[in-house]
Image (cartoon, helix red, strand yellow):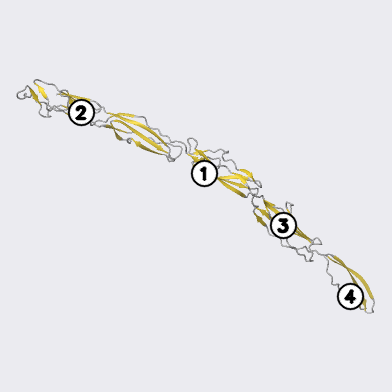
Amino acid sequence: MLVALSKKKYQQTALPVPIKVQMALPLTVTDMGGNTSTATATVTVEDKTAPVFTCPTAIMKDPDAGKCYATITVNEPTATDQCGIVSLIHGTRSDLKALTDPYPGGETIITWTAADGDNNIFSCQQSIFVSGSAVSEIQWPANVTVGTDPGKCTTSISSTVLDAPNVVTSCGNLSFFCERSDELYTDQPFPKGVTTVTWYAYDDNFDIQDSYDQKITVEDLENPAITCTSNINVTNDAGKCGAIVTFVAPVGTDNCPEATTVQTAGLATGSLFPVGTTTNTFVVTDAVGRTATCSFTVTVADIELPTITCATPDASYPANNGVCTYTVPGTALDPTFADNCTGESVKNNFNNTASLKDAIFPLGKTTVVWTATDVQWQYGHMQL
């Protein structure tokens, strides 16, 4: 028996196919004898493919001026579906606020979702990042000027001086840390001069939001010190109008290095100090110009007597013609004298002068006493 299928089973109605539909298709079979038989087939069409769209790119923006947030316009993506119908597309913020609300500092995630009529869903996430904490005002520590600690070229600064900055207004949590320009810890002494302490403010994401340089100036307010030897008292060297004197030259000290000591008056050690008193003065100057002075005296006493030698007179001298006296014609009767120091003098007791020239002696024997005196009023006597 031959059976032929009716062409009707290949014919379809040219209608749009829904997202999901069941269709009843009639089937007829006919044999060669013209006998027929019919049946109905049910065809179910389902949409299993989700809609698609391109996820919006991430957005990064600074806060609005003076605000703790940023005003951002986000654009809803356009989705397509193979069946041509997208029943739902929406965005949900991670903070559950409306897409049009301002965005706070930090990251906000928008989850975009598209669904078709058969509940096929496609989603993606868009990052919205508002940088910084939008700090309005920080009260930074003031610059500090202090003196060195006694006897030191540094100073220890208390934690209250280096207290952390004060947040006056801020949109988020802020923490602080600081670094010294000399790379030492803040609890270590600060040296003389200027040290910069750089403060950093950072948010909960460890992002640096602001910074400030605090100047720590340490001044050397301490004077240097110097101590001289005791006063020196000596007698003159033999035949000298002075004495060789040695001493240990003082060296000044200071709480900071680079102090220098110079002698500003007197003579150096090992010099011939003259008879009398010489004042030696030493000055120490530190690196900032502060000074200290000390002095001591070197006193040389002249204990050496002057010398005097009388002239040798003749055995006798004749009286001058017509008179009973003798007039000394020159200086032959004057003595010679000397001293270790200049300035000595001589005189006699006959005419109280330094010479017998033109002196008139009476008849008989006359004793003349010569006296030499040095500058220290020391005497040497000789009798003629």
What SS does tag 2 mark? Answer: strand
User: Disc 2 residue type?
Assistant: Ser
Residue at numbered disc 1: 195
Q: Quadrant of the C terminus?
A: top left
Q: Relative to residue 272, is residue 349 drawn left or right?
A: left
Determine the CA span between mark 3 and mark 1.
49 Å
What residue lies at 20% left-to-right and 28% top-to-bottom? 345
User: Disc 3 residue type?
Assistant: Gln
In this rendering, which labeled residue sits more in front, label 1 or label 2?
Answer: 2
Q: Position of residue 360 (x, y in %)?
A: 11, 24
Determine the CA span between mark 2 and mark 4.
169 Å
Q: Nearest the camera: 188 or 299? A: 299
Outermost residue to the front: 65
What residue lies at 33% left-to-right and 29% top-to-bottom? 232
Q: Earlier in the sequence, mark 3 or mark 2?
A: 3
Residue at numbered disc 2: 345
Residue at numbered disc 3: 125
User: Disc 1 residue type?
Assistant: Thr
Q: Earlier in the sequence, mark 4 or mark 1?
A: 4
